[in-house]
Image (cartoon, helix red, strand yellow):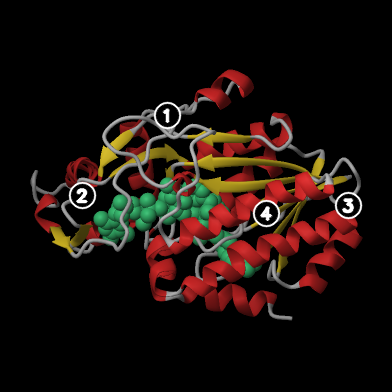
Amino acid sequence: MKTIFITGGAGFIGSHVVRRFVLQHPEFRIVNIDKLTYAGNLANLKDIENKENYIFKKGDINDTVFIQKLFEKYRPEGLIHLAAESHVDRSISSPLDFVMTNVVGTVNLLNIAKENSSSSFRFYHVSTDEVYGELGKDGYFTETTKYDPHSPYSASKASSDHFVRAYHDTYGLDVVLSNCSNNYGAHQFPEKLIPLAIHNIQNNKSIPIYGDGANIRDWLWVEDHAHAIEEVYFKGKTRETYNIGGHNEWTNLDLMHLLCSLMDEKLNRPSGSSKKLITFVKDRAGHDVRYAIDASKIEKELGWKPSLQFKEGLSKTIDWYLGNPKWMKAVTSGDYQHYYKKMYEE
Ligand code: NAD
Ligand code: DAU
């Protein structure tokens, strides 16, 4: 059986990618490699954890011996790399953690792959639109937009993107990349705007909006991203990157207004009550004004486009969080980590 490694598969996007590959590709053994940081949660994969073509390996992408042994054991035909520190605010308070995982960890994987894989091995780096910096009122990020990262997070992802291409140019490794906009959906850690707001509204706590709420993000349903990743892995051209986005721009404030009105309906609260929880707070340092993706390349070349309208996706997302109070309780109390840490402790 051929093997694909997926790193960061216990996280938000990774769990949707692992599920998609395990269910759609029974011909592959999927090995999920994840350190289970605060953002990794194996409850995200409960429904597929007993599938025959799924294996979980707990470990750090910086652990050379551990990763090397996995390469020797499984001889993977490819690796889809999602493991990362992913939250911009945390990168502002702890930038070195981002360098260690996103830069050094990625180079460690590249190095081991270069030494321990066949010529057909493919290394896929899942990256972000934040490497391009920020846009003004007009225009879109294309695949040729110059890199101009502003936060320690985006600088670390830009750096790892460069290393990935350098390993192709210098050592001939088959690499492919994608740069995606903001994802939303089930399993997202409630430090990120949408799940944080859902959780706070449910608990009648304030919704913190950075600055004046005019910053713009382009939102994509996470399962559409997982589908795009599948297309890029199998059909993407070597050394190319594919921009992935939802054609779906919202100011943070407009997005919160929509979310609040959906929450009022779903919680049977008087119209306008959730909106009252919106609180303007100090702006994020280096807060990028606007992101927007031109996704025409992946659409034209690989035939991918988003499947869901935003309002429908947001409504489904709220339903998931409201329908899974145990998930949210475990995540916010930290219980999810104790349970799984014990189970996989060496
Ligand atoms: P996440 O924070 O939810 O999950 C990250 C996962 O990586 C966790 O399971 C964590 O345990 C694991 N991990 C972290 N450090 C590790 C290490 N040293 N070794 C092994 N595993 C480790 O992140 P996410 O939002 O799912 O993002 C996944 C990837 O997609 C990241 O590379 C991110 O840069 C990229 N991305 C995210 C978005 C988004 O909107 N969330 C958009 C574009 C690109
Ligand atoms: O664009 C892709 C990126 O999207 C990914 O690469 C990152 O991993 C992912 O975390 C996300 O980054 P953002 O910083 O855009 O996501 P976040 O949910 O943290 O914030 C979305 C917007 O909302 C941003 O403009 C900051 C703002 N915000 C965020 C939080 C957490 C608030 O106003 N209040 C908040 O409490």
* Pointer 2 or 4: first along the chain: 4
| Residue drawn 60% across the image and 71% down it | 100
**Other-residue count near label 2 (Cα within 10 Å), few / some / many at <14 / 14–19 / ≥20:** few
* Pointer 4 or 3: first along the chain: 3
| Residue 146, image x, y percentages | 49, 41
* Three-letter amino acid code at the position of disc 2: Leu
Alpha carbon of mark 1 to alpha carbon of mark 2: how far? 23 Å
Image quarter where ligand 1 lies: bottom right
User: From the viewer's perspective, is residue 35 above or below residue 174?
Assistant: below
Query: What residue did someone put label 2 on?
Result: 267
For the residues carrying marks 1 and 3, which lies nearer the camera in this image?
3
**Other-residue count near label 3 (Cα within 10 Å), few / some / many at <14 / 14–19 / ≥20:** some
Tags 4 and 1 in contact by the CB under 8 Å rule?
A: no
For the residues carrying marks 1 and 2, which lies nearer the camera in this image?
1
Alpha carbon of mark 4 to alpha carbon of mark 1: how far? 34 Å
Lateral position of residue 169 relative to residue 37, left or right: right
Q: Is mark 2 within 8 Å of ligand 2?
A: no
Query: What residue did someone put label 4 on?
Result: 163
> Which quadrant of the figure contains the C terminus?
bottom right
Mark 4, secondary structure of its residue: helix
- The tag on residue 212 is none
User: From the viewer's perspective, is residue 220 above or below residue 215?
Assistant: above
- The tag on residue 308 is 1
Tags 3 and 2 in contact by the CB under 8 Å rule?
A: no
Alpha carbon of mark 4 to alpha carbon of mark 3: how far? 18 Å
